[in-house]
Amino acid sequence: VSGQPRVLGRVIDSFVATYGDGLPALLEREGDAAAQRLRWRRACHSARSALGTIGAQSILARVMQFERRAADDGVPLDELASEAVELHQELQTLARRLSREFDG
């Protein structure tokens, strides 16, 4: 982060601590369709700035696309649920990779 390795380390540590378990809200299937869509959109919204801060542009784009699709009642819930699981796993994988790279 602007040539400040300690700041970068803190940012990465924070990301790993927050998203090491992915986004569990993306796995929740409780409530009606509207509640699920809202929960998924909120989870994605909260992850966007963290992903942007660490420069994870590819997954950021996927999260933003999912957030838009979750707002579209025309997209089948089952389709979104599959995408939600994939995003959750991608965030876990990214956090593990970052942890290995910056801890070791």
Image (tube, helix red, strand yellow):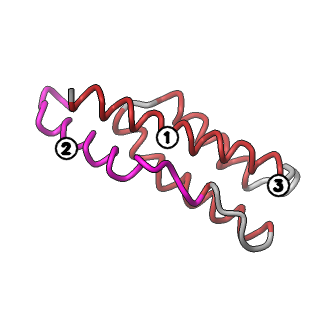
Query: What residue appears at the point 13 percent right and 30 percent down from the top-left corner?
Result: 5
**Which picture quadrant has residue 28?**
bottom right
**In the rendered view, does 29 fall on the left or right side of 60?**
right
Q: Is residue 5 above or below residue 66?
A: above
Answer few, some or many: residues within 10 Å of disc 1's Cα (few below 14, many 20 plus, some between 14 and 19). Answer: many
Query: What residue appears at the point 87 percent right and 51 percent down from the top-left corner?
Result: 76
Instruction: Provide the residue span drawn in magenta.
Output: 1-25
Residue 10's mark?
A: 2
Residue 91's mark?
A: 1
- C-alpha span from label 3 to label 2: 37 Å
**Which picture quadrant has residue 32?**
bottom right
- C-alpha span from label 2 to label 1: 18 Å
Answer few, some or many: residues within 10 Å of disc 2's Cα (few below 14, many 20 plus, some between 14 and 19). Answer: few
In the orientation shown, which residue stands out farthest toward the bottom? 31
Disc 2 secondary structure class: helix
**In the rendered view, does 99 fall on the left or right side of 47?**
left
Q: Earlier in the sequence, mark 2 or mark 1?
A: 2
Q: Is residue 71 above or below residue 4?
A: below
The question of residue 22 being in magenta is answered with: yes
Disc 3 secondary structure class: helix
Image coordinates of residue 88 in percent, x first then y, are 57, 45
Q: Quadrant of the N terminus?
A: top left
**In the rendered view, does 2 fall on the left or right side of 75?**
left
The question of residue 15 being in magenta is answered with: yes
Disc 1 secondary structure class: helix
Question: Which residue is identified by label 3?
Answer: 77
- C-alpha span from label 1 to label 3: 21 Å
**Which picture quadrant has residue 9?**
top left
Image coordinates of residue 14 in percent, x first then y, are 28, 48
